[in-house]
Structures are given as C-alpha cells and as structure tokens.
Amino acid sequence: MGNIKTVKAEILAIGDELLYGQIIDTNSHWISQELDKIGVKVVQRTTVGDNREAILAAFKAAEQRADIILMTGGLGPTNDDLTKPLLAEYFDCEIKLVPEALEAVRTFFEKRGRELTDLNKFQAHLPTKCTYVPNEVGTAPGMWFEENGSVWMSMPGVPHEMKKLMEDFVLPKVKEIFPLPIIYHKVIKTVGIGESWLADLLKDWEKNLPEHVKLAYLPSLGQVKLRLTAFGDELESLQNDVENQIELVMPIIGKYVFGYNKETLEEAIGRMLKQAGKNVAFAESCSGGYISHLITTIPGSSEYFQGGLIPYHNHFKNKLLGVDEATLAEKGAVSEETVIQMAENVKGMFESDFGLASSGIAGPGGGWAEKPVGTVWIACASERGTITKRLQLTQDRMLNIQLTAVAVLNMLRLVISGKTE
C-alpha cells in the first residue's frame, strides 16, 4: 500500500438524550460508513452526556487516538448545550460574534417568517480559533478546528443538517488535507453453518491471505457474513485481489454461500426461483406467516410466490390442509410425519413446484421431555421427493420464529440448487 499512513477518526455523539435511549444514534453509523468510503479508519465511537467533565475527558481521549474528531450534538442555544463553550475552553480561546454567521441565522428566520431572538443570536457567537462553516439548512453553524495536530469538526445533531455539512464540507476537506488509501470491501453471505465451523474450514485459506487483504467474521441470525477488506492505492487492483481470494475459497464453502454484499436470503431465494422458472407455497404453523412475510417483502415476488396457509390449530391442519387425523393424533403436530403431509399438500393445493412446511414449539411454554421448547420440524416437497429436518432451537419465542424462517429458506435454497445430500 506504499507509504500511505492510516488516517484515524473518532466520532463523538454528545447529548443526554442518546444515553437515556430517547434518541437512537443513527448519525455515528452514517458518518462511519461515509468515512470508510474515502479510506478513513474509524477507531472509536463515543457517546457522552451533557456533562462538562465527561465532554472534556472525551476531547482529550479522542485527541490521543485520532487524526480527525467529528462531533455531533450539543450546539443548541440553551444552557444544557455545552459543546461550543467547552471547545472554546479546551482550545483556550474566546467566543465572539461572527457577523457572517449572524446574517445567516437572521436570513434563516426571515425566510420562515419567525422572529430572531437574543437566544438565537447566540448561535452566531463562535470560538475564535474555529473556521465558521455555514449551515444552510439549520441555525447552528459547523465549527472546524485545526489544533494540536488534529482536525476537529463540530456539527448539529439533527441528521439532515449533519449530513449536508459532511457532504458539502467535511468529506471534501478531509480528502484535501490527508493522503488517503483506497479501501474496498466485499461481503460473502453464508447460511447453514456456524461461525466456529466456518472458521475451522477457512483456517488455511485465511492464513494465506495477502497482507493487504483482511477477513472479518460477522455473525447474525442463522447466518455468517465474511467481510473481505483490501487496502491499497488502486481500486481495480484491489477488486481483482478480492475476487481472486473468493475464487480460491468457493470450493471450500460454496455450499453455504447464498449471495454477496447486501443481498438478503429472501432476495437470493427470489433470484434463484426466477432463474429456474419455479414457484413456491408455504404451510406455516409455528412460524405464523413470517416466512411468507419475508418472501413478499421482495418486489416482484408475485412471479414465484403462489401463496400459503397458516393452519395453526390442528383442526385446520386436517380440515384445510388435509393432514391425516390419525397422524395428528398418533404423532402430533410437531412431527416429521405431519410436516411431510403439510409440505406435500400445500404444494398440491397451490399448484407449486415447491411446498414448504414448519411446525414446532415456539415457546416459552408447551414443551415436554420428548419435545422441549424450540423443537421444530421443517419439510420441503418437490418433484424429486420430500426432505425433512428437525431443529432444536432456543427458549425465546421470537428468535425461534426467525431461526425457523432462515432454516426453511435455506432448505429451499439447497433443494433449488441441488445441494441437498
């Protein structure tokens, strides 16, 4: 990567409302993504309340860690808004009226037919060591400092105001000041294998990755994302390096890979069904329609989704879906025999190529020794026959519903692609 130094950033989100959970800090997430795109490494994200000592301590710690410190919040005109006076204190300077800032605030209020109060005029008073950065969509200006070997930017906490300042001023300014590397990410999406098993499969491949390509494991609900990140000076070269590594790893984990980057499992299923010219129907008991919901969140799903049933009560498993009364009485709703009939019958009822079924004990009650909470049977019926699987999930009801959906969709993925054993 040549001699380009890693440029480090810290994001400080200021305000009691963030600590109390009254507002979700979406700002820091967005800023992190934008910095990543230009090759700046975020080393810390800190949330601090409206407290003098805490804010000053956060400033000091950030300065030791980062080349760029980006702050949001605490810029209002009231006494609990401490960012501006504390920046003046930290950089040992006065706060003075900036005529240009006052004119901008006055214009902002005039355009909206509102009176400019003395409190609002205070928005135009800024630390003398900062560069005034106009806020075209709000009243609190941005403040840019270049002090103590770091650059600092203070922005309002209102998301659309912060984003405009970032896009119009901060990002271009950072690119102008710092020589930045190019960072390229590609995410491999896997399902049906746990993180530790995946890591075991990949240990030799991971050991032989080029020095400028890093691997991160990002587990989520029933899935594991593998993020490959390449650092360098030339984008096309980095893309080629990452693609070469994916080519090497696919023979090892190809069975578990359903897509890349932001593609969801339900999007991948839709893509595969369309490519195969096939369609699907679901009979959902314990998943309560959640799988059908996921499938229908995808635009164009009417091309491949025939419909579904939620025969939650055993009476309707028999009455509507045609599951044998004797099967329900002898084997129970949560059984391999029941889900086989559910899958095969829903396939016939909706004239679909694939019929899938779920039946289980979602919890938190209802389990017993033979079938504890979290026991789920799933099945997929196709022209090649019917396959089944027993899952033993958790004690948490919603988690069991979501994990069942992932398992059913993964079963369908394997059947469509012919990867079932």
Image: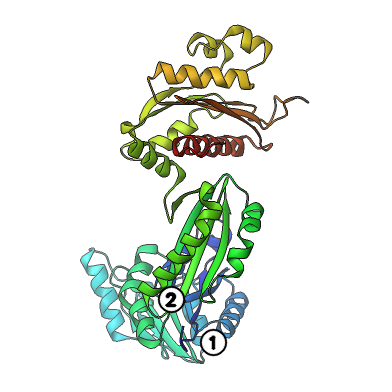
Q: Do we see residue 23 in this rendering?
A: no
- Residue marked by disc 2: 39
Residue at image coords 41%, 72%: 238
Q: Nearer the viewer, mark 2 or mark 1?
A: 2
- Residue marked by disc 1: 90
Using the image, determine if residue 267 lies above or below residue 98.
above
**Amino acid at dot 2:** Gly
Dot 1 crowding, Cα within 10 Å, few <14, some 14–19, many 20+: few
Q: Of the residues under marks 2 and 1, which one precedes in the sequence? A: 2
Q: To which quarter of the image does residue 141 belong?
A: bottom left
Using the image, determine if residue 148 lies above or below residue 77.
below
Q: Nearer the viewer, residue 123 or 39?
A: 39
Residue 119 position within the rendered picture, expressed as x and y whole percent measured from the top left: 39, 73
**Amino acid at dot 1:** Tyr
Q: Do we see residue 179 in this rendering?
A: yes
Q: To which quarter of the image does residue 326 belong?
A: top right
Residue 191 position within the rendered picture, expressed as x and y whole percent measured from the top left: 54, 46
Q: Secondary structure at mark 1?
A: helix
State the quadrant of the C terminus.
top right
